[in-house]
Image (spheres, rainbow, N blue to C red):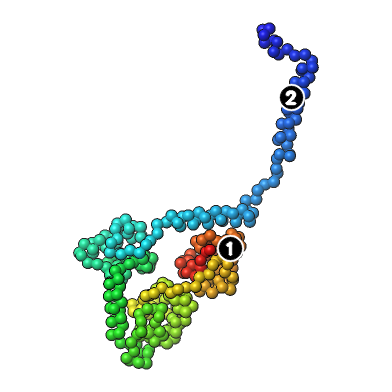
Amino acid sequence: MKIFKSHFWYNKNQRNGIFLLCIIIIILQIIIFSKPFSSKESIDVNSPELLAFQQQIDSLKQVEIENRKPKIYPFNPNYITDFKGERLGMSLQEIDRLLSFRKTGKFINSKKEFQKVTKVSDSLLHKIAPYFKFPDWVVKRNQQKNISKNISTPISKNYQSDNYKISTIDINKATQEDFLIIKGVNNVIAERIIKYRSKLQGFYFENQLYEVWGLDKNIADNLLETFTIIEKPIIKKYNINTVNFKELLKNPYIDYELCKKIFDYRDEVAELQSLTELKHIKGFPLDKYDRIVLYLLAE
């Protein structure tokens, strides 16, 4: 007991010193947890700065998601496998029809034959047909067939000459007189097609023909049986980060209201890293995205 007592026995001065030390420690603790080190300021999660920062993060995530999506490269539809067909969005029945057709030793030589054999929907065909790549000799043969067919086709009564022969089957180079050989196409409709083609800077997708005002769907179908896109048009593109309001309105698929929304969004994010960010704009017409971006780029 004497041993422990010697360690806990203090005189008056020592006890005063210990007491003073305890007071100092308590005061320091109070200072640490008092106002100088605390903040009553709350963070506003709806502030424009935080929202803009969050949008940038979301846009980067979206770009990464788009980059990770499997890309489609040109391919010969005759050699679609089960795995390839599934990735393209084909059903098992559609894939089986194609494989059964190929087992007979026959080949598909056009997108129309592909749809006839597989019975895929029009929407899926429009989505994957641009990636079809047939051998050059097949393409040339199809072009010759179309030319021969068009030359032998009697001209429509809409055109004054009974001996007129079309100059080309390329819908982007055809003249107003060329379009008049199609039944149901008169001078007014043919002129509208030319004007709309000029507005678009050329048809990039065949189904853009259906957008011509006053053009009946059946007549458009007849036109596409004769005319097709041989060469894709070279479209003038505007940088989405530097284009001015008037230039952006030249985009045939952007009206005043959408143009204003795009500029408001650009002001918020400062700079668009990718055109896919346009899909984040509230009210953006997603069904026209593939057409709108034909005239834009992000740099």
Residue 30, image quadrant: top right
Q: Which secondary structure lies at badge 1? A: helix
What residue lies at 28% left-to-right and 61% top-to-bottom? 79
Q: Amino acid at mark 1?
A: Arg
Mark 2 crowd level (few <14, some 14–19, many ≥20, 10 Å Cα): few
Q: Amino acid at mark 2?
A: Cys
Q: Position of residue 29 (x, y in %)?
A: 71, 31
Q: Position of residue 32 (x, y in %)?
A: 71, 34
Decide which of 253, 141 is in the foreground and name it.
141
Q: Which secondary structure lies at badge 2? A: helix
**In the rendered image, the vertical position of residue 160 relative to residue 203, given as above or below:** below
What residue lies at 77% left-to-right and 17% top-to-bottom? 14
Q: Which residue is mark 2?
A: 22
Q: Label 2 vs label 1: CA separation?
A: 60 Å
Q: Which residue is mark 1?
A: 266
**Quadrant of the image containing the N terminus:** top right
What residue lies at 32% left-to-right and 58% top-to-bottom? 84
Decide which of 211, 270 is in the foreground and name it.
270
**In the rendered image, the vertical position of residue 219 relative to residue 239, given as above or below:** below
Residue 254 circle label: none
Q: What residue occupies the far top of the structure in this picture?
A: 2
Q: Position of residue 77 (x, y in %)?
A: 30, 64
